[in-house]
Image (spheres, helix red, strand yellow):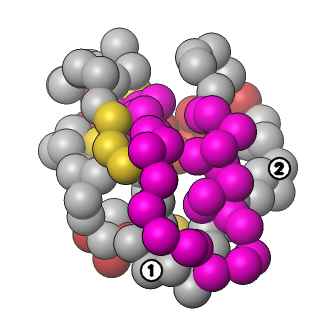
């Protein structure tokens, strides 16, 4: 994907299995604007249950950020490391099918 990768230090702080120790000066930057399927913004400060469920799956639309965001990269819960795994890339047909379940499919609030 285009864009700037997160710093190695911010990734380490988020994913290290050892509990976080103290505070750092490391910063994380937002790579996407997070949108619900209806086009409403989902704020970074939100919780996973704030992501709407569509056909049994939490569905986010990722867009280019409207403005540059950054925050301290330290973990809020020191004993809880983050993980992310790309299990597979959707086919073009699957992508069109999921996109059709959003308001963007009709051109309303079209992401950039």
The answer to whether 67 is drawn above or below residue 12 in the figure is above
Residue at image position (39%, 21%) is: 64
Q: Name the residue under label 1.
A: 77
Mark 1 crowdedness (10 Å alpha carbons): few <14, some 14-19, many ≥20: few
Picture residue at 72% right of the left edge, 79% below the top? 18
Labelled disc at residue 99: none
C-alpha gap between disc 1 and disc 2: 29 Å
Whether residue 84 is situated above or below residue 42 in the rendered picture: below
State the extent of the magenta-drawn residues as a range. Answer: 6-34
Magenta stretch contains residue 16: yes
The quadrant in which the C terminus is found is: top left
Membership of 13 in magenta stretch: yes
- Please identify, in this view, whether the residue under mark 1 or under mark 2 is nearer the observer: 1
Which residue appears at 49% of the width and 43% of the height? 26
| In the foreground, 58 or 28 | 28
- Quadrant where the image shows the N terminus: top right
Q: Which mark is residue 88?
A: 2
In this figure, what is the number of numbered marks? 2
Disc with the residue nearer the chain's start (1 vs 2): 1
Q: Position of residue 15 (x, y in %)?
A: 68, 64
Q: Is residue 67 left or right of residue 74?
A: left
Question: From the viewer's perspective, is residue 18 above or below residue 28?
Answer: below
Residue 62, percent from left and from top: 43, 35
Q: Residues within 10 Å of mark 2 (few under 14, many from 20)?
A: few
């Amino acid at each position: 994907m285009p864009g700037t990768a997160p710093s190695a230090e911010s990734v380490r702080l988020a994913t290290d299995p050892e509990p976080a120790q103290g505070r750092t000066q490391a910063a994380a930057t937002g790579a996407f604007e997070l949108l619900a399927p209806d086009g409403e913004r989902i704020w970074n400060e939100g919780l996973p249950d704030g992501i709407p469920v569509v056909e049994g799956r939490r569905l986010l639309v990722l867009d280019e950020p409207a403005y540059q965001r950054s925050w301290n990269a330290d973990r809020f819960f020191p004993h809880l490391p983050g993980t992310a795994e790309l299990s597979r890339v959707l086919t073009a047909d699957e992508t069109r099918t999921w996109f059709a379940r959003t308001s963007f499919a009709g051109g309303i609030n079209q992401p950039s």
